[in-house]
Image (cartoon, helix red, strand yellow):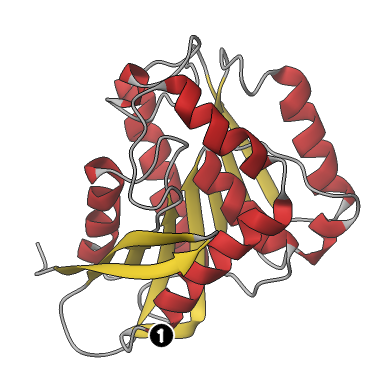
Amino acid sequence: MTTVTTRTVEYPADGLTMIGHLALPAGTGRRPAVLVGPEGPGLNDFQRRRADALAELGYVAMAFDINGGRWFTDPQEMLARITPLLADPDRMRDIGHAALDVLRAEPRTDPDRIAAIGYGTGGAIALELGRDGVDLRAIGTVNALTTGRPGEAARIRCPVWAGVGSEDPIMPPAQRDAFAAEMQAAGVDWRLMVYGGALHAFHHPTVGHAVLPGVGHHPLHAQRAWRDIVGLLTECLPVAE
């Protein structure tokens, strides 16, 4: 296992002071980098560990914040914060760009080799960065089959991988179809993986305590989805190029 260095980074976005988590791999040279976006309740140790795991693989990784350091345990509070955010692509892009600026400013980051992955709301933000024309090497999302404003998906310049549970009531088949149609019409190199029997936020072992019906952990598919995301990065953003 490589030695990983971590630190907290504070930066402004969406009228809040965001508190992100930056993980650096061993060594001193520049490395490809990955933004890691959290689900609606916010950034917690689970997603910080995801960044650490990517740093162990050789990436500079930043788990970014969406709620100004808060982790929502009350579902109604979370929805009051997240629902209007998800309805406003420009706000999502501002949050994503603010995190991306921090990641790019890190001296260990190769600014020309960055990918974005995200879960739920964090995945929606990653997709909006793509729709905004950001030069990313890959976008990977779980439980984030959001669609954008008409025509803007044509600005996506990298492969897109999306994972969703087959029993997810928040991302039902109609939403899957709309996402697939948007990506296909835009000429995006896209993939959609449906994990049989999984609910919303199936990747997260604790998020079900804080959210709504239709949410549940599926340990086996959680492991598979992580391997699929690592595979996407290995293909599109290899550590050694």
Residue 23: % across, % down:
24, 67
Q: Residue at left 31%, top 18%?
A: 209
Q: Is residue 206 above or below residue 89?
A: above
SS under mark 1? helix
Q: Quadrant of residue 84?
A: top right
Does residue 96 appear left or right of residue 32 in this picture?
right
Q: Quadrant of residue 108?
A: bottom left
Q: Nearer the viewer, residue 87 or 204?
A: 87
Does residue 191 appear left or right of residue 224 in this picture?
right
Q: Please identify the residue farthest to the front as the structure is shown.
A: 15
Quarter of the figure with the N terminus: bottom left
Residue at the spot of label 1: 105
Residue 231 visible in this rendered orientation of the protein: yes
Of the residues shown, which amino acid type is indicated by label 1? Ala
Q: Nearer the viewer, residue 159 or 211?
A: 211
Quarter of the figure with the C terminus: bottom left
Residue 12: % across, % down:
45, 68
Q: Nearer the viewer, residue 97 or 199?
A: 97
Q: Residue at left 84%, top 49%?
A: 149
Q: Residue at left 25%, top 65%?
A: 55
Q: Residue at left 57%, top 56%?
A: 139
Residue 34: % across, % down:
42, 65
